[in-house]
Amino acid sequence: MRLPRRDARLRGQGRRAADPARPSRRPGARARARTRARSPVSDYDLKHHGDLEVAPGLLDLAVNVRGAAPPAWLRGRLERALDRLGSYPDPAAATAAAARRHDRSADEVLVTAGAAEAFALVARALRPRRAVCVHPSFTEPEAALRAAGHGVERLVLAPPYVLDPEVVPADADLVVVGNPTNPTGVLHERLAELCRPGRVVVVDEAFADAVPGEPHSLAGRGDLPGLVVVRSLTKTWALAGLRVGYLLAPRELVEQLRSVQPLWAVSTLALVALETCLAPGPVRTAERDAAVLAVERDRLQSALEAAGVEVAPGSRAPFLLCRAPGRPDVRESLRAGGIAVRRGDTFPGLTAEHWRTAVRDAPASDRLVEAVREVLSSAPGRRSA
C-alpha cells in the first residue's frame, strides 16, 4: 500500500484541514465544523507521558495508575511464580483467561507487554493508506505509527470531545480512538459504527475496567470486522513496571499482529498477573473499586468547578481534564506547591492552560482543590503568601 506523503490535520467535527476553502466531500459533515491549518509533526511532544511529571516529594496526580504497588494477594501470586523463571514463558493460561473474561475464542487473543506493545504491533504489521488518530487522546498509537513510517491524520475533537462516526473519513483504512478517552474521560457510544470491511479500528480500552459496568466496551464484539480492542492491567492493579496487556481481534488479524511480535515478548510474571487479575474474583473487586472512584471523581469535579476551573464534561474515567482560562501557569504553580498533575499541551488539540488530574482518595482531592484555590487567587506565575 502506498503511504500518504503529508500530515493533514482534521479539526472539530471533521473537515479536511488541507484546504479550508474546499467544501467537505462528506455530506454528513457538520456545519459547525472548524478547521486548523496543517502544522509540523513536532508541534506536540507525543512521547511525553505523566511519569515525566513525577518527582520525589510530590503528590502524584499525574500518573493514572491506581496505587503505588499491587495488592498483597497479587504480590503473593507473583512471588510464588518466581520458581518458574527458569523456563520460557507460556502464554496459554493467560490467553485462555482473557478469552473467558470477554467470551471470546483463545485464537482471538494476543497477550502483549502492555498496551504500548499492542500499538507498536499494529504499526509494524499493517500498511494503511490513510491512518486517522482521534484526538485529544493517548499519543503513543500515533507515535508508533509515525515511527514505523506511516503518515497520520489527526481528527481533533472540540469540546465536549464526543466522536460522531460520520466525521471520520470514509476512506480511512485505519482508525485509532480511546474509550474512555485519555485525557478527556469521554466514553464514546457509537464506535461500532466505525467498523466496516477493509478498515481496521483500534480501540484503546486501557481504562475500560475503571468504568463501572464497562458500558460501551467492544471487547466482547467478535462479530465486528477489523476491530482491535487493546486492554491493560496497568492502571487498575498498579502494574506499570511489569508491562501487562492484551488485545482482542479477529483470528486472522491476531495472526498478522503475532507475526511481528518477538518470541517470548511477555514475561512469566506478567502472564501470571494477567491470568490472576482476569479471574472472576479480581474482576468483581475492580468493579467495586471503580464505583468508589466514580463517586470521588464527581465530588472532585464539583469542587474544582466551584474553585473556578473548567472541567471537561462527562468524564467516566478516574481522571479529569481541567482548564483555567488565561492561566497557563497553574500546573507549574501546583508543582511548586508539591502537587504533580499531567500537562495538557502535549495532547493534540489542547493547550498549556489544560492539565489532567488523576482521581485518588478524598484527602488527595481536598489537597488539590485547596492548592488550586490558592493558585487562582494569586497573580499569574506567583503563589499567594
Image (spheres, helix red, strand yellow):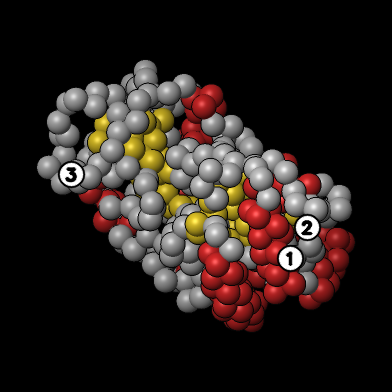
Q: Residue furthest top?
A: 5
The residue nearer to you, when weighing 341 against 50, is 341
Q: Which residue is mark 3?
A: 31
Mark 2–mark 3 distance (CA, rounded to whole Å): 44 Å
Three-letter amino acid code at disc 1?
A: Arg
**Residue type, label 2:** Leu
> Which SS class for mark 1?
helix
**Where residue 81 sits in the image (x, y, percent)?**
82, 64
Q: Residue at x 46, y 21 (%)?
A: 40
Q: Are marks 2 and 1 in contact (CB under 8 Å)?
A: yes
- Report x, y in % for residue 376: 63, 53
Image height of 184 relative to 4, above or below: below
Foreground: disc 1 or disc 3: 1
Which residue position holds label 1?
Answer: 367
Quadrant housing residue 174: top left
Q: Is residue 125 left or right of residue 329?
A: left
> Secondary structure under badge 3?
loop
As drawn, 321 above or below 299: above
User: According to the image, label 2 marks what residue?
Assistant: 59
Left/right placement of residue 328 relative to residue 29 reads: right
